[in-house]
Image (cartoon, helix red, strand yellow):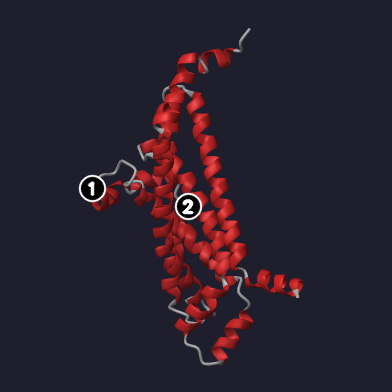
Amino acid sequence: MMPYFISVYFTPEKIQKALDVLKNDIPLAIWETVYVTLVATFFAFVIGLPLGVLLVVGDKGGIRPINAGVMKVINTVVNLLRSIPFIILIVVVFPLTRLIVGTAIGTVASIVPLVIAAFPFVARLVESSLREINPNIIEAAQSMGATPMQIVTKVLVPESVPSLISNATIAVTTILGYTAMSGAIGGGGLGNIAIMIGYQRYNYLVIIIAVVLLIVIVQILQSVGTYLSKKSDKRLKHQHRKHTD
């Protein structure tokens, strides 16, 4: 006798519906998910990268300390934005999203809350990457008369590229997870299909398909990020030359 769960949730009609979704809706949903993820990641880094640099450079003991009160305000804002659950943040920024995009619902509209949720996270990742750099390298640059801007552009950022790429991979996979949640408010992509067609219409096969595809996309992005991080790591290149010599 067929188990109750299978007989109810995996009927021939629902299997056929899932196949129709896979054929007609999934290709566009994959594109929307990847597009929104990459665009949101780009803008999150446009804001988060200089902010992360500022958190390191402007800190007490940094190469260009700024007012302690200003730094405290920046840190507080970053921490507050990071602590707001994404599903709530989407609703909170509806007015801003509507102001920028013209609507608060849809694939493009979901980019605004994604960027706002991601850039504080990116800033902390960048801060972490920059703080890993050997202080002796910075001191050597200062002793040679390098300006703070030169130290940032020619020492801090270049030296932290492998770590930045690795952290960018973490950021992009996190944002990808956020896109699934944005489907709850019609954000488009695989999350929207999983919620609107899978969950609300009790077609769990659609949910399974969407989840599997999200996992595949995450694995691809993770593999690409790991490859690029290793490729840019000077230490690994140096070790490889030593072995070949």
- Look at the numbered disc 1 and give the secondary structure of its residue: loop
**Could you give the CA–CA distance between mark 1 and mark 2, rounded to whole angstroms?**
27 Å
Q: Which numbered circle lies on residue 126?
A: none
Residue farthest toward the top in the current orientation of the protein:
1
Q: Position of residue 141 (x, y in %)?
A: 56, 87
Given this view, does label 1 or label 2 mark the residue nearer the observer? 1
Residue 104: image quadrant is top left
Contact? badges 1 and 2 (CB < 8 Å): no
Residue 119 visible? yes
The vertical placement of 179 against 193, above or below, is: below
Report crowding for label 1: few under 14, some 14 to 19, many 20 or more residues within 10 A (C-alpha).
few
Q: Position of residue 132 (x, y in %)?
A: 61, 71
Report crowding for label 2: few under 14, some 14 to 19, many 20 or more residues within 10 A (C-alpha).
few
Question: Relative to the observer, which residue lies in front, 33 or 182?
Answer: 33
Question: Relative to the observer, which residue lies in front, 119 or 155?
Answer: 155
Residue farthest toward the front in the current orientation of the protein:
245
Task: Name the quarter where the N terminus is drawn.
Answer: top right
Residue 199 visible? no
The mark nearer the N terminus, 1 or 2, is 2
Question: Which amino acid type corresponds to the residue marked 2 in the rendered image?
Answer: Ser
Task: Name the residue beneath numbered marker 1.
Answer: 102
